[in-house]
Image (cartoon, rainbow, N blue to C red):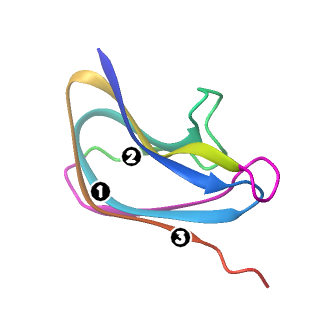
Amino acid sequence: ESAEVFLLRMLPGGTVYELIIDMAAAQGEVTLAVGLESGAAPFDGAGEVTADGSLYRFQIQFTVPGEPGQSVRVKCPILQMRGPDAVVHVANVLIRKVAEV
């Protein structure tokens, strides 16, 4: 058994963003990722969440593909859960543009 939950955002192409999320997983297998709505493979930085019931902070930095000024539909965050009793609690989500230097 599996499930996927995500927040869909319109973000400008060619821009660097950072996802910061505080979350806990209590059972099952849980993967945290960021990717395109089109269903392509997740961006680099996806990882497994420790399912011990403790609250953890995760950070994923990613570049939105596409041309500047073009809006792209991005799933951020993506939570993929596997197992009949998978439990996830999300406390905070922050998606912010990384400052250009």
Q: Is residue 47 above or below residue 19?
A: above
Q: Quadrant of residue 100?
A: bottom right
Is 56 contained in the magenta span?
yes
Tell me the CA gap for discs 3 and 1: 18 Å
Percent across and percent down for residue 77 are: 45, 48
Other residues around mark 3 within 10 Å, as few (<14) / some (14–19) / many (≥20): few
Percent across and percent down for residue 87 are: 19, 38
In magenta, the rendered stretch is 52-70
**Quadrant where the image shows the C terminus:** bottom right
Mark nearer the viewer, 1 or 2: 1
Which of the two residues, 36 or 44, is positioned nearer the viewer here? 36
Q: Is residue 29 above or below residue 16?
A: above
**Which residue appears farthest toward the top when viewing the image?**
1
Q: Residue at x 58, y 42 (%)?
A: 73
Q: Residue at x 72, y 62 (%)?
A: 15
Q: Is residue 18 above or below residue 81?
A: below
Other residues around mark 2 within 10 Å, as few (<14) / some (14–19) / many (≥20): many
Tell me the CA gap for discs 1 and 2: 9 Å
- Element on which disc 2 rests: strand
Q: Which mark is residue 23?
A: 1
Percent across and percent down for residue 66 are: 79, 47
Asked if labels 2 and 1 touch by Cβ distance under 8 angstroms, the answer is: yes
The residue beneath circle 3 is 96
Is 53 contained in the magenta span?
yes
Q: Earlier in the sequence, mark 1 or mark 2?
A: 1
Percent across and percent down for residue 80 are: 40, 32
Q: Residue at x 39, y 61 (%)?
A: 21
- Type of amino acid under label 3: Arg
**Quadrant where the image shows the N terminus:** top left
Mark nearer the viewer, 2 or 3: 3
The residue beneath circle 2 is 49
Mark nearer the viewer, 3 or 1: 3
